[in-house]
Image (cartoon, rainbow, N blue to C red):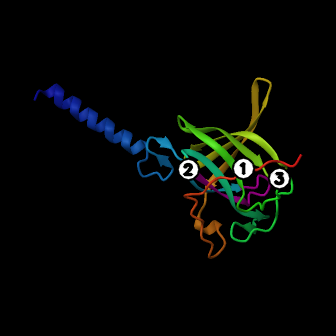
Amino acid sequence: MNNKFLQFLLLTCLISTCLFETTGADNRNRLGDEYDITGFWKSMDENTGLIAAIIGIYEYRDKRYGKLIITYNDGLVKDTIYNPGEQAEKLIGTPFFAGLDFIWDLELKGNKWINGCIMDPQEGKFYHGDLWMKDDELIVRGKIKIGFIFLGRNQIWLPVQSSDLPQGFILPDLSGTIPTRWQAVE
């Protein structure tokens, strides 16, 4: 073998190793070469900085959906998927908040999950939604269309830690979950 071929081979191996390391083959939030948002996330109250909810993002037919697992009030557990209490009065059927699907139909495009729907169950309002990973954070963008433009805002969700959960709480297995769509009361 000639020297230039060996240099090329060595350079190729080095680049491959660097790419493997930077794509985070061990990162729990990666799906092949694309970001995966599946898992459990906590949203924080923007005024108090305390946990507002724990959300489970799950897959159904290659799309991503979101379900409320635990709701909090002033950082204290209010409802859980196993022991729901408060109901969403602005939705037909007044489902419980805990256990409620409120994100639907996110499709992967590049490294973002887009073209989905995010619902505010307290108000019974629906928004266009996109979610994507930035480092270990999940960026959640809800937006409305006004004319030809979208206006919206972002929230940052963080991975759930065992210390975020009530003592003895076991996160549900969401594999096999079939999403439920809700409609607002008119």
Residue 133 highlighted magenta (yes or no): no
User: Which span is picked out in magenta?
Assistant: 44-60
Q: Image height check: is 68 above or below 132?
A: below
Check the image and name the residue furthest to the right: 186
Task: Residue 1 in the image: state x and y as whole percent.
Answer: 10, 29
Residue 54 highlighted magenta (yes or no): yes
Q: Nearer the viewer, residue 97 or 54?
A: 97
Q: Residues within 10 Å of mark 2 (few under 14, many from 20)?
A: few
Q: Residue at x 78, y 43 (%)?
A: 126
Q: Which secondary structure, mark 2?
A: loop
Number of marks in picture: 3
Which residue has dot 2 on it? 136
Check the image and name the residue furthest to the left: 1
Q: Residues within 10 Å of mark 1 (few under 14, many from 20)?
A: few
- The numbered dot on residue 91 is 3
Which residue has dot 1 on it? 181
- The amino acid type of the residue labelled 3 equals Leu
Q: Nearer the viewer, residue 124 or 113?
A: 124
Quadrant of the image occupied by residue 53: bottom right
